[in-house]
Image (spheres, helix red, strand yellow):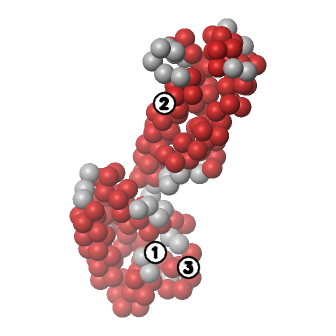
């Protein structure tokens, strides 16, 4: 189906036109969603975002103006905003998660924190950090976010994030003592 036919069908809320729109642009929408959400969300989040993009386009087709942009460009602009909203929501959820024992990488727990007591000590030490440092540790070492992403998310320079992480690791080493230092150094 050509773009003009697709547009006419979409304006009449023809489901065949929606299906054509999805077939025509799903690869582009999925790729853009993945690029925006990839470091924070799962494959399911990306798929949901892609579905939301087409649903939003379906609901708001009457706002589309062919004079301003092509249909593909319009769909990708919707995708950009839907994906950015999804990424922001996912980051908010992540930052509100408590640092549960399950969030600590299994390698660290099994090699250096073998007993329940040692794991509880680690939890206590993590809770003693300031909220921002705890979030930075969690997001950097448990969620594997880049320093640049963290700097952007917190409005800090890369050097400031590096310094905060270094100080937080040093504090954790001091709080946990000599026996557990090896596990903390793996962070």
Residue beneath disc 2: 77
SS at mark 3 in the image: helix
Q: Residue at x 36, y 91 (%)?
A: 178
The tag on residue 70 is: none
Residue 148, compared with residue 56, is above or below; it is below
Q: Work out whether residue 165 or residue 57 is closer to the camera in this orientation and state it.
A: 57
Left or right, residue 71 beside residue 13: left
The tag on residue 120 is: 1
Q: Earlier in the sequence, mark 3 or mark 2?
A: 2
* Residue 114 position in % (x across, y down): 54, 84
Give the number of the mark in front: 1 or 2. 2
SS at mark 2 in the image: helix
Left or right, residue 118 beside residue 164: right
* Residue 104 position in % (x across, y down): 50, 70
Quarter of the picture holding the C terminus: bottom left
SS at mark 1 in the image: helix
Give the number of the mark in front: 3 or 2. 2
Q: Work out whether residue 126 or residue 85 is closer to the camera in this orientation and state it.
A: 85
Determine which quarter of the picture holds residue 58. Answer: top right
* Residue 118 position in % (x across, y down): 47, 81
């Amino acid at each position: 189906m050509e773009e003009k036919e697709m547009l006419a069908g979409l304006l009449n809320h023809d489901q065949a036109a929606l299906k054509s729109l999805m077939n025509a642009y799903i690869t582009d929408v999925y790729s853009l969603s993945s690029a925006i959400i990839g470091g924070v969300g799962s494959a399911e989040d990306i798929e949901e975002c892609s579905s939301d993009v087409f649903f939003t386009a379906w609901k708001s087709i009457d706002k589309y103006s062919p004079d301003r942009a092509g249909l593909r460009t319009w769909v990708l602009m919707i995708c950009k905003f839907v994906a950015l909203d999804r990424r922001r929501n996912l980051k908010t959820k992540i930052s509100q998660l408590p640092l549960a024992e399950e969030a600590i990488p299994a390698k660290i727990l099994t090699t250096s924190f073998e007993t329940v007591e040692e794991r509880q000590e680690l939890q206590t030490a993590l809770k003693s950090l300031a909220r921002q440092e705890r979030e930075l540790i969690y997001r950097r070492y448990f969620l594997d976010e880049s320093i640049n992403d963290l700097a952007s998310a917190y409005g800090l320079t890369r050097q400031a994030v590096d310094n905060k992480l270094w100080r937080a690791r040093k504090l954790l080493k001091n709080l946990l003592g000599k026996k557990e230092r090896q596990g903390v150094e793996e962070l």
